[in-house]
Image: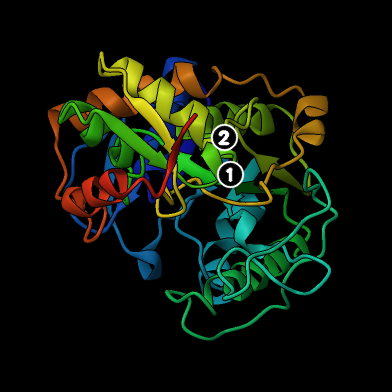
Amino acid sequence: MRHALVIGGTGMIGGAVARHLIGAGWQVTVTGRRPRPVPDGAALLLADRSALPTGAYDLVVDCACYTAEHARQVLPLMRDAGSAVMISSKAVYVDAAGNHVNSPEPPRFDGPVTEDQPTLPPGDMDYDSAEGYGPNKVAAERLLLDSGAPVTVLRPSKVHGPGSNPPRTWWFLKRALDRRPYVLLADGGRGADHTSAAANIAALVECVADHPGRRILNAADPDAPDGLTVSRVIAGLAGHTWEEIDDETGRHPWHRVPPIVLDMTAATALGYRPIGDFAATVVQEVDWLLRNRPEDPEGWFDYPAEDARVRSGSGSAR
């Protein structure tokens, strides 16, 4: 039985990776800084990054690597592993003007973003900030890829799944559960930001485990639904329909114009087979949200303001 170590395995992506590998017959150990539920069949090791376990694993997956220092801490384990994965982010990519997803000016990519797209320069400022998140990820990526270890860097987009934080799906799901008669959609819902199911990321991790190497791969769903499609899928899962109104204030969490789509050619060529498309994989998150209703993020559900917009005739029905 092959043995995998999943660092940050109590989070959304780590939990999905652990569940998938266990289902594929792996022995899985997950690390976490505090006692939290872990997938059935996984062993929990309470440890922070300064006290990671030693030993040789068939697969090491780091779901909590945000800085070059984090990369240095995990590098000995990755050097000794049969295969290794670092979870990075599409936030590293920049367009021709140097804009990225966390910059004041949104990026404008010419088409689907490949792994060869230029990135931000590496940095070591506060990684938990709009300015520092991407540069720190780049610094961590480069340290690991330059080490000679069999590390594959995965760059997801907008991740969804059980345990999501923030729970972006809640934007539409709560409105559907509240039986709102209409939904406001900026640009008619044409904006899109490629979705990445945690379950699909996990499937790609297993593929990488079977094909060790040093590489970068985008990690996204097989489809890239726009906001209109996302709204209809989630409303349908809640058993609700509504009038769709084109209104500039309806900027949902997937609103990106022009759309951001990751090119998945490289992962597919390696043998990646996704679990399902957005409509199939988001069911898990919806079920989880129905059991664990989150606190409403500030500013997401200003129904009086939406009603006032509709009464004023500011928007137009699709």
At a point 75% along the width and 34% down the height, the residue shown is: 264
The image quadrant of residue 236 is: top left
Q: In this figure, which residue is indicated by the disc labeled 1?
A: 191
At a point 49% along the width and 47% down the height, the residue shown is: 186
Seen in the picture, residue 96 relative to 310 is either above or below; the reply is below
Mark 2: few, some, or many residues within 10 Å (few <14, many ≥20)? many
Mark 1: few, some, or many residues within 10 Å (few <14, many ≥20)? many
Where residue 299 appears, as percent x and y from the top left, is 24, 60
Where residue 205 appears, as percent x and y from the top left, is 59, 34
Regarding mark 1 in the picture, which secondary structure is present there? loop
Q: In this figure, which residue is indicated by the disc labeled 2?
A: 226
Check the image and tell me how it is coloured.
rainbow
Q: Is residue 162 left or right of residue 72?
A: left
Seen in the picture, residue 275 relative to 74 is either above or below; the reply is above
Residue at the extreme bottom of the image, as rendered: 125
Q: Is residue 18 left or right of residue 190?
A: left
Q: Hey, what amino acid is under mark 2?
A: Asp
Badge 1 or badge 2: first in the primary sequence: 1
- Nearest the viewer among 285 and 25 is 285
Q: Is residue 21 left or right of residue 47?
A: right
Where residue 247 appears, as percent x and y from the top left, is 44, 47
- Nearest the viewer among 144 and 287 is 287
Where residue 22 appears, as percent x and y from the top left, is 41, 22
At a point 62% along the width and 31% down the height, the residue shown is: 204
Circles 1 and 2, Cβ within 8 Å, touching? The answer is yes
Regarding mark 2 in the picture, which secondary structure is present there? loop
Residue at the extreme front of the image, as rendered: 312
Q: Hey, what amino acid is under mark 1?
A: Gly
Q: Is residue 81 visible?
A: no
